[in-house]
Amino acid sequence: MQETLLTLHHADTRRPEYALTLECPLSLPTPSVVAVYGPNASGKTLLADLLTAKHPLRGDGGLVYGPQLDEAARKGGAVAHVLFKDVYGGAEPAYYQQRWNHGDEQVFPTVAEQLAALNTPDSSDPMTLLRQFGVSALAHRAINTLSSGELRKVQLLRTLSTRPRLLIIDSPFIGLDVEARATLCAMLQQIGRELTLMVVVSRRADVPDFADYVLSVDHRHVSRLMPRAEWQAAAASSAEQENPSPKAPTAGQTSAECEAVIDFRDITIAYGSRKVLDRLNWCVKKGERWALTGSNGSGKTTLLSLVCADNPIAYACDIRLFGCRRGRGESIWDIKRRIGYVSPEMFSAYRKDLDVMRIVASGLMDTIGLYCRHRPEDEAVCLEWLKAFGAEHLARRNYLTLSSGEQRLVLLVRAFVKSPELLILDEPFHGLDDAQTRSAMRVIDDYMTRPDKTLLMVTHYADELPDCITHTLRLPRHTAAEA
C-alpha cells in the first residue's frame, strides 16, 4: 500500500506573487510518478518551489510531510529539484566563449570530480551511477567539453547521487537524442518504483507513458491529481490558444554576393585522443535550409561554434564564411553581424538584469547584454518581432523574472531581430510549450520565404523541423566517449 509522502493543503504564500490556487489539497503518494503539465508561465516551477519549501506559506499546516520526510531527512537533501538551466553545476563559464577556450580548461572539473565533490556517507557511488546510465566514458571529461545533452545527463546523476525521496525534474528530455531519451525514460521508470518522482513538462508528448498521475497547471491554478488515462481523455478534447497566423516582419538585411555561405574543407577537430569532427567537407549555399542532426556528443555544437566565430580553433581550419577564409583579417563581429543565433549555451550564459526590450535589442549589436541606448526605430523593430512570436506582452518585463520557457522564447526572438542572412537555431524550442512551438515553426517557415535567407537548425525531434528544410547533415558518433 502506498504511503503519503507529503500533502500541500493550500498554496497561499506570504508573498502574493508566489501564490497558486489548488482545486483540492494535493497529496503525493510514494512511490509514484507524477507528471506536471502546463504551458509556459503557468506556474509549474512555482509549484515545485512550494513543494520544496522555497517560499513560506501563510499559517501552519500548509505543507505537511509524511514519515519518510521527517526533519532530519529533509535537511539531508531528501527533497530535490533539478532545473536544467544550471547545466554546469556551479562551474559555469565566466564568459560566453570560455567553453571553447581549452587553455582555460583547468577551471572546469571533470565529471568524476564534480560527482565526487557531492559524496556523502549516504550517497550513491558516482561510477556506479555513470555505468547505470551508460555514460561511464564521460567520467574523466572536463565539464566544458560536454555537449548540452551530456551536461543534462551529468546534472541528473549529481542529483540522484544524494538519494532524494522526492525528486522533481524540470524539462528532463530537452537536449537529449532519441537513444538518450529512451535510456532516461527507462531509468526514470525504475526510479519511480522507489521514490516519488515529479516530471515537469510543457509539451503533451513529453508526459511519460509510465506516469501514474498527471497534474495540470494553467494560469497558476493546479488541478486535482488525475490518473494518466483520465487526464489523456480530458486533454484530447481541450483546445489550446495560439498566436493566429504569425508572420515574420518584412524589413531585413540584404545578402552579400557570395554563392557559398559556409564552406568547410577537410575539417578535423580533436581534443586529445577524442575526435569530434573527422575530415568534414560541407558546403551550405545561399538560400539553403539545413537540418543538422546527430547523437549527443557527435559534434553539432562544436560545428556551430566554428560557424559563429566563438571557437578559436577555427583559425587553424580551412573554413570559408560568406566567401572569405577565416583568419584573413576579419573580426568576429564582421561575421556575427550577419548571423542570428540561439542555443542552450546562450540560455545558460544570458543572465542579465534587463527588461525584455533591451534583451531583444542586444541582438542588433550581437552582444550578451545591451551597452548603449537603443534608438526608437530599433525599439519599433524589436516590438514587431515580439508580436510575431506572440510575446509583445513581455516587452516591459524584467528578463530574470520570466519563466524559463518565456526566457527561451525571448532569446529566440533575439536571433531574428536583425533579420540575419544566416539564421542558426540550435534546439530553439527547448522549454517552449506546444502552442509556442507550432507558432515559432510558422514564423520560421514564413521568414525563410525571404530571398537568400539561409538556415541551420539543430533538433533531436523530427516533428520540430519546419517545412522549409531542404537539406540534412547527420554527424556520426566517432568515439565511445561521445555516446
Image (cartoon, helix red, strand yellow):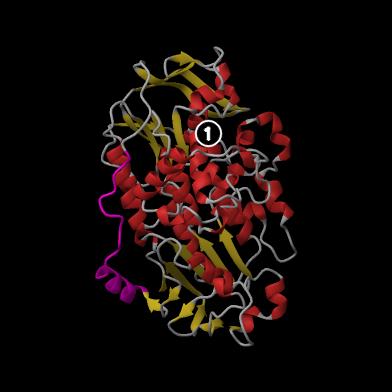
Residue 98: say if magenta: no
Residue 351 as seen in the image, left or right of residue 205: right
For residue 439, above or below residue 299: below
Q: Position of residue 48 (x, y in %)?
A: 54, 69
The residue at the point 56 percent across, 20 percent down is 331
Of residues 198 and 124, the one nearer the viewer is 198
Is disc 1 surrounded by few (<14), some (14 to 19) or many (20+) residues within 10 Å?
A: some
For residue 324, above or below residue 420: above
For residue 257, above or below residue 75: above
- Residue 298 shows up from this direction: no
- Identify the magenta region: 228-249
Of residues 202 and 177, the one nearer the viewer is 202
Give the residue pinned by disc 1.
366
For residue 25, above or below residue 464: below
Q: Which image quadrant for residue 322?
A: top left
- Residue 374 shows up from this direction: yes
Residue farthest to the top, as pictured = 328
Q: Position of residue 99 (x, y in %)?
A: 62, 36
Q: Position of residue 384 (x, y in %)?
A: 37, 45
Q: Which image quadrant for residue 40?
A: bottom left
Q: Position of residue 420 (x, y in %)?
A: 40, 31
Task: Give SS at disc 1.
Answer: loop
Residue farthest to the front, as pictured = 376
Give the amino acid at mark 1.
Answer: Asp
Of residues 17 and 240, the one nearer the viewer is 17
Residue 241: say if magenta: yes
Of residues 369 and 175, the one nearer the viewer is 369
Residue 372 as seen in the image, left or right of residue 483: right
